[in-house]
Image (cartoon, rainbow, N blue to C red):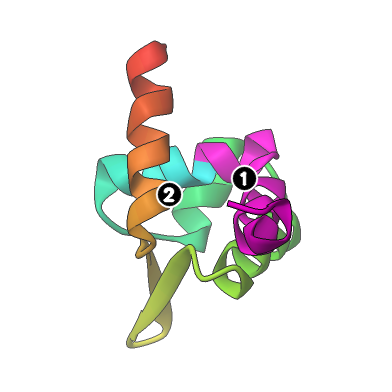
Amino acid sequence: MEWKNLEHEAELFKVLANPVRLCILIGLLREGNCQVSVMQECLSLPQSTVSQHIGKLRSAGIIHGERKGTQIYYQVVNEKVKELIKIIMEEK
C-alpha cells in the first residue's frame, strides 16, 4: 500500500489525537448515546469547548447526532473508531 493512499486514515488519527475527543468517544461508547450538556458536566469544560470537539468528530464522520425534541443525542457511527476505542479501553 502506498502512503498516498492513507490520507483518510491519517486525518482520522489527527482527529482522534486529542484527549478531550478521546474522552468524549469513550463516554459515548459506554453510554450508547449522550447529549452535550451531560458531556460538559462530565468533562468540566464550557459548552462551547465541548461543542467544538463534537463538531470536529461529526465532520470526520466519527459521530452522528439525532435530534429528539430540543436535545441532540450523539453516538459513535464509525466502526473502525469503535474498535480503536475498545482497544484503548482494554489497555487501561
Three-letter amino acid code of the residue under disc 2:
Val
Q: Position of residue 39 (x, y in %)?
A: 50, 49
Secondary element type, mark 1: helix
- Viewer-proximal residue among 54 and 49: 54
Write down the residue under mark 2.
Answer: 81
Residue under label 1: 16
Give the magenta range.
1-23
Based on the displayed image, in which of its 4 quarters is residue 76 positioned? bottom left
Q: Are marks 2 and 1 in contact (CB under 8 Å)?
A: yes
**Circle 2 SS class:** helix
N-terminal label among 2 and 1: 1
| Majority secondary structure of magenta residues | helix
Figure check: 29 above or below 37: above
At horizontal 60% and vertical 55% (from top left) the residue drawn is 9
- Residue ID at (46%, 46%): 25
What is the x, y in percent for residue 32?
A: 25, 53
